[in-house]
Image: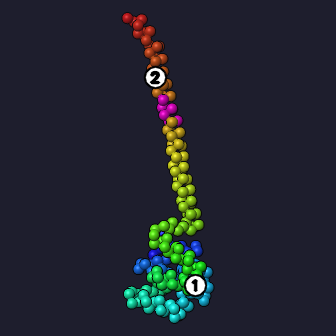
Amino acid sequence: MLTKTNPVVAGVTVRIDENGFYSLNDLHKASGSELNQSPGQWLRTQKAQDIIDQYLTVQNCIVKKEGRYGGTYAVEGVAVAYATWISGKFFKEVIDVFLAYKSGQLKPATSPMDELNAVVLKERTSLAKAKVASEWMHDRKREKKKLADEAKKAIDELQQSLDLLNFVGPKLLVKK
């Protein structure tokens, strides 16, 4: 499960699965992806087994998934232990991010591509509005010309009627 509020460590969004398990592969990527620090390497250590054994008495704590979004996922405590194994500096960064994530203090994660897409969407919306406004103005100009032509025609007809009255009027008066 990837949402805009997932934790981001060293610029890498850490996926969280439907059970709330954190992707150790994403943490590995965030750490710099040294082969000797992969989740598989860590899981072979006795320290990792000891930590996992502590969690296994309470719950399943680690899951390996196949497929496109596959990888190794673990409960938060195991993920933090993995970060500790990589390095003290990396552990501090992970724990700070995870604490901010848990407390709701994380800002939504956005990539430069997300930001570019937002700008493009705003621009497209603006252009669409401008196009509608332009079409409206064009229609308004045509309508205004049409109304002006109709008004001129009506005035001309009225003028002809007045001219006719002026022409016929005095003759009618004379016949009386």
- At 39% across and 90% down in the image, what residue appears? 57
Q: Is residue 41 visible?
A: yes
Does 57 appear above or below 105?
Answer: below
| Front position in the image: 102 or 5 | 102
Where is residue 58? Give x, y as percent.
Answer: 38, 87
> How far apart are the two marked residues, 2 and 1, measured between alpha carbons?
94 Å
Label 1: few (<14), some (14–19) or many (≥20) C-alpha neighbours in 10 Å: many
- Do the numbered discs 2 and 1 sit on residues whose CB atoms are within 8 Å? no
> On screen, 61 above or below 133?
below
Q: Quadrant of the N terminus?
A: bottom left
Q: Earlier in the sequence, mark 2 or mark 1?
A: 1
Provide the secondary structure element on which disc 2 rests. helix
Measured from the top left, where is residue 45 in percent x and y? Answer: 53, 93
The amino acid type found where label 1 is placed reads Ile
Relative to 112, say whether 82 is above or below. below
Horizontal and vertical percent position of residue 118: 54, 61
Question: What is the x, y in percent for residue 87?
Answer: 59, 83
Residue under pointer 2: 158
Q: Nearer the viewer, mark 2 or mark 1?
A: 1
Determine the main secondary structure of the stretch shown in magenta. Answer: helix
Left or right, 124 with respect to 164, comes to: right
Quarter occupied by the C terminus: top left
Residue at horizontal 40%, vertical 87%?
A: 60
Residue at horizontal 52 percent and vertical 35 percent from the top: 145
Q: Residue at x 49, y 70 (%)?
A: 100
For residue 21, what is the image quadrant? bottom left
Which residue, given by chain and number where applicable, does mark 1 sit on?
Answer: 86
Q: Amino acid at mark 2?
A: Leu
Query: Which range of residues does the magenta coloring cover?
Result: 145-151
Taking the magenta stretch, the answer to whether it contains residue 89 is no
